[in-house]
Amino acid sequence: MQGKILMPIGDATETLDTMYAYYRLPEEGLEVVVAGPEARLYHMVLHEIPPNPDVPWDITQERPGYHLQAEVAFADLRAEDFVGMFISGGRAPEYLRYDQNLLRVTREIAEAGKPIACLCHGIEILTAADCIQGKRVTTVPKCALDAEQGGATYVNEPIVLDGQLVTGRGYQDNTELLREFIRMLRETH
């Protein structure tokens, strides 16, 4: 299989959401193109609920993760250059969803019927790009409202497939999500 997969990132992109796909997709012959608001190095984070029951957390704790270089800026992206898109989570989508160039290319990829995989908070980008209206999706439960505000039906399942869109709750669902995304990419070219 050949082709380029768009992977948008920003500071506070979740490490495990991102790195599994970053290394798994090239094993299928696909080129992952990492893009950001600017072409520069971005700081990734780790999100988890700490396992210590003596100090309960209602939400994930964030710690520094690895770094990842974006080779291209969102402003320079062209949807026709990509066979699909992989959107990871973390806190980055909270501000990336305001980038009009990212929203443009996301809409164009979706409208072209190209496969899109999305984990966790990445749903915020799809909502802002108006790409999930009438779809069934999943995401981390704390983003269910974001999915519903985008016109989607939220279901709390590991992954949900609806047309050319496959969504997952978080990094724990990466294996199943990537299996479906790769199958979809094979079927489209």
Image: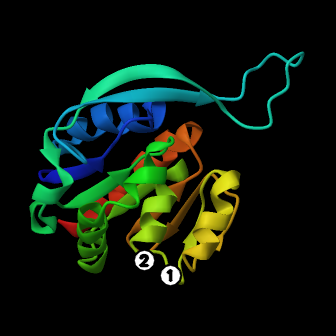
CB contact under 8 Å: marks 1 and 2: yes
* Horizontal side, residue 45 vs residue 4: left or right: right
Q: In this figure, which colouring scheme has been used for the structure?
A: rainbow
Q: Residue at x 16, y 66 (%)?
A: 79
- Real-space CA distance between mark 1 and mark 2, rounded to the nearest whole angstrom: 7 Å
Residue named by callout 2: 130
Image check: 113 left or right of 172? Answer: left
Q: Position of residue 93 (x, y in %)?
A: 45, 51
User: Residue 160 falls in which quadrant of the image?
Assistant: bottom right
Quadrant showing the C terminus: bottom left
Element marked by disc 1: loop
Inspect the image, locate mark 2, and give the three-letter code of the amino acid beneath it.
Asp
Residue 47 position (above or below residue 147): above
Q: Residue at x 44, y 35 (%)?
A: 12
Name the residue nearer the viewer: 26 or 129.
129
Q: Is residue 57 above or below residue 185?
A: above
Residue 62 in the image, given as x and y percentages of width and height:
59, 27
Q: How many marks?
A: 2
Left or right of residue 169, residue 36 in this image? left
Q: Which mark is residue 133?
A: 1
Q: Position of residue 40 (x, y in %)?
A: 19, 33
Q: What residue sits 38% from the left and 53% below the top?
A: 96
Residue 155 visible: yes
Q: Amino acid at mark 1?
A: Gln
Residue under the image location 50 percent in, 60 percent down = 123
